[in-house]
Amino acid sequence: MLNVLFVAIGVLLLTSGGEALIRGALAAANRMSVSPLLSGLLIVGFGTSAPELVVSIDAALNERPDMAIGNVVGSNIGNILLILGICTLITPLAVKPLVLRRDGVTVVAASILFLILVGGDALVRSDAAMFLLALLVYLIWAYWTERSGEAPSAQLHRAEGQELTSLPRTVLWIIMAIVSGLVLLIAGSQVLLMGAVGIAETLGVSEAVIGLTLVAVGTSLPELSISVIAAFRRHADVAIGNVLGSNIFNLLGILGVSALLQPLPVHERIIKFDQWIMLGTSLILLLFLYTGSRLSRLEGGLLLLGYGVYVSLSFTVFGV
C-alpha cells in the first residue's frame, strides 16, 4: 500500500508540475510575442511530455533502463489506445487527412527508426544522436511548412496553444509557475520511480512491465487532460494532434536525451512484443488519418478494449 501511495503522490506531483510548466511557458511566450504557431508546436505539443522526459532521464541516470524505455514505449501505446479511445467516447473524432498527415507519417517513421536502432539490444549514444537529429529535422520541417500560418496544421498548432486558459499574467507569477513546475516534476519522478520499483518487486514482475503500464499511464496524464479538454470542445484535430506531437517527442526527444546520458539496454519483451504493438497502433492511426474516416465511438471502444488486452497480456504472458 505504501508503494501504491508513492505512485499516486508521484503522479499527482508530475501532473501538477507539467501543468504549471506548460502554463508558465505559454505565458512567457505570449509576453515575448512568440508566435502562437511555435507555442502550440513546441510548448503544448512537447510540453505535455515533460513528465515522461523527467522520469526517463531520472531512470536512465539511476541505471533503470527498463523504466526509461518502458515509460516511452508504453506512453506511445497508451496515447493512441487509451487517450484517443477515451476522447472518441466523449465525441466522435472526424479526422482531416491534410491537417495531420505529416505528423502521422512522422510517428510511424519514428517507430520504425526505434525498431531499427534497438536491433542491437541496446540504445547507445550514436543511436541517441540519430534520434535527436531526426527530431531537429522534424521541427525544421514542421516550422517551414507552417511558417505562412495558412496551412491547416498551422491552424491546429495555434489552436493547441489556446486550449489552456487562465495563464499567469505577471512576470513574478510566470517565473513561479515555471520554477515550481520543474521542482514538482523532479520530485514527482523520484517518488513515482520509488513506488513503481517497489510494486514491481512486490508483484514479482519486471520493471519493464511497470514502466510500460503504470508509469506510462501516470506520466501521460497531461496529454490526457489536454486531449479531453479538446474533445469536450469538439476540437478533434487538437486532440489527435496533441497525441501525435507527444508520441514524436517521446521517441525522438526523450529516448534521444536519455540514451545520450546513459546507454540503455533494451528488455527482451520490448523487442519481442511491445515495439510491435507500438508500431501497429501507429499504423492504425495513420490509416484513419489517410482515409479521412470518422473515428466513431465504436472504434474508440475498440481502442480501449485493445488497451485492456495489452495490459492484461503485459501482466500475464509477458510479465517476466
Image (tube, grey):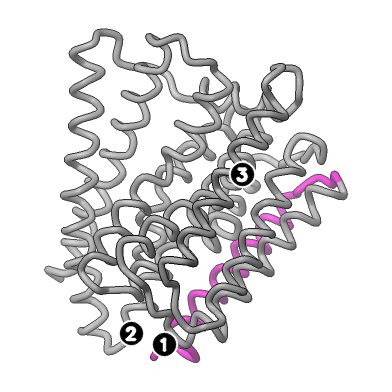
Give residue 110's position: percent from left, percent from top: 62, 59
- Of residues 35 and 312, the one drawn nearer to the viewer in this rendering: 35
Up-down relation of residue 105 to residue 165 (above or below):
below
Q: Label 2: which residue?
A: 206
Give residue 8's position: percent from left, percent from top: 23, 57
Badge 1: residue crowd in 10 Å (few <14, some 14–19, many ≥20):
some
Q: Is residue 308 magenta?
A: yes
Q: Label 1: which residue?
A: 319
User: Which corner quadrant holds the C terminus?
Assistant: bottom left
CB atoms at circles 3 and 1 under 8 Å apart? no
Assign the magenta stretch its main secondary structure.
Answer: helix
What residue type is disc 3 on? Val
Between discs 3 and 1, the one toward the N terminus:
3
CB atoms at circles 1 and 2 under 8 Å apart? yes
Badge 1 element = loop
Q: Label 3: which residue?
A: 137
| Magenta segment boundaries in residue numbering | 292-320
Badge 3 element = helix
Left or right: residue 49 versus residue 182 is right
Q: Residue at x 23, y 65 (%)?
A: 61
Q: Is residue 2 visible?
A: yes
Between discs 3 and 2, the one toward the N terminus:
3
What residue type is disc 2 on? Ser
Left or right: residue 147 versus residue 254 is right
- Of residues 312 and 259, the one drawn nearer to the viewer in this rendering: 259
Which of discs 3 and 1 lies nearer the camera? The answer is: 3
